[in-house]
Image (cartoon, rainbow, N blue to C red):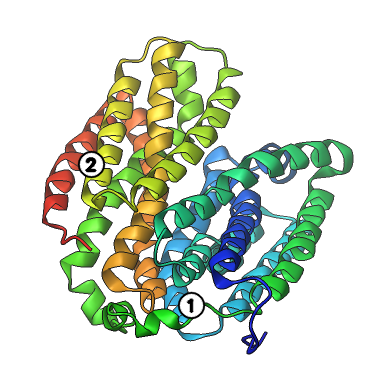
Amino acid sequence: MNQISQRPFIPDQYYRWIVVLYGLLLQAISVGTVIYCFALFTLPWLEEFGSSRRDLMLTIALLQIGAGLMGPLAGRALDTYPTHWLILTGLACMALGLVLAQQATALWQLWLIYGALLPVTMTLMGTLAAQTLVSRWFDDGRGLALGISAVGSNVGGIILPILVSAWLLEVGWRETLNHLMILAIVVVLPMTALVLRRSPPQQRAHSDTSAADQRQWTTKEILTTSLFWIPFCGLAPLSMAFGTLQFNLGIIVRDIGLADSVTGNLIALTSASMIAGKLFFGLMSDRIDHRKLYWVANAATVVALGLVMIADSLTTLTVAIVAAGISGGGILPLMGLMYSYRFGVAAFGRVMGFGMLTIMAGAMSPIIAGWVYDLFGSYDYALVALIILLIPVAVAMAWLRER
């Protein structure tokens, strides 16, 4: 996969959009398989292993915690080593994890797989890798490119569950995991070989902004500047709020007195709203102050939390879910844009790696909200706490230095 020395058949200005579609594909396969298909395996795993729901949910929590901890290491690696080898490492961990999961005879074995192998897939073959790659190819129009690329996780969340639902009925959960492994290898391996044979253009090194864009930030410099912490502290509560609503949606639907079947429709609506949010924030970020866009996402989250607290009908809950989906969809594009325009592309992987620790906040918040519900019989206290948390971080965003 050496850089092409002769004039390429497809100019860089067009080839970079092929890179965007490749990033979309990576996230569709990795996030779609590991995150969105998880819920479909819960019932067969409950029957197979005879575990409690709490213990089964720990599986997905370990994945998110592992991905958060892996983020800084993966980001540093993406800034240091060839991208295609790291992506193939993520693919290898995914294939190995799915093979081992097929042989699982106890839930603790799935804990090891989801806590050790699949976090490598999520960081080296997921959003972090895709956003790092896309940022290197784009200067102008980076926001739209990141937004389109980020849609991949939702595309995978729509298509793969349909396939998995059919496979589970036909061949059972073990063979379904085998099908997912084959699909990942057949799609990702040749696409990686084809797309990443060309390196990102180097002409930006001669621009007036190249010195700042190519600066190599040290870990100490990253973790001691407000350029990192203001976006981090602003986006973490958004992730917490979205995770709380997303993973407790079924219980919220039942508490309102709606039919359980409504939950599936609202999950689909969440995915559609996230796609709209990613495209909106991605497109607007090339034109509008990032701080103003954050305030839009923050306000939408507050609206969503407030409506859930007073919801007594499907209409109110639907509006809340749309607002939460739009805001949740904007989290990753906003993070990528805030960091890439302030730290440059040379250090983007490392900075985003630390930024992905927000995943841990999103992983823990549904558990905490469930604990609050068990204590008080309501999510209201947890939702109010999130709203209170969102106010000071919105104020602090005013001090974020623009690009």
Up/down of 245 relative to 176, above or below: above
Kind of residue at disc 2? Trp
List x then y, in percent, for residue 3.
Answer: 61, 86
Which of the two residues, 69 or 181, is positioned nearer the viewer here? 181
List x then y, in percent, for residue 295.
Answer: 23, 41
Residue shown at the point (59%, 53%) measured from the top left: 31
Residue shown at the point (30%, 66%) measured from the top left: 341
Write down the quadrant of residue 242 in the picture. top left
Up/down of 393 relative to 69, above or below: above
Tell me how many marks there are: 2
Residue shown at the point (44%, 20%) measured from the top left: 318
Provide the secondary structure element on which disc 2 rests.
helix
Q: CA distance from mark 2 to mark 1?
A: 30 Å
Earlier residue among tags 2 and 1: 1
Write down the quadrant of residue 30 in the picture. bottom right
Q: Which residue is mark 2?
A: 295
Residue shown at the point (41%, 41%) measured from the top left: 280
Q: Which residue is mark 1?
A: 78
Q: Which mark is residue 179?
A: none
Q: Give the farthest residue toward the right.
A: 170
Q: Where does the N terminus fall, quadrant-wise?
A: bottom right
Up/down of 334 relative to 198, above or below: above
List x then y, in percent, for residue 17.
Answer: 57, 61
Which of the two residues, 193 or 70, is positioned nearer the viewer here? 193
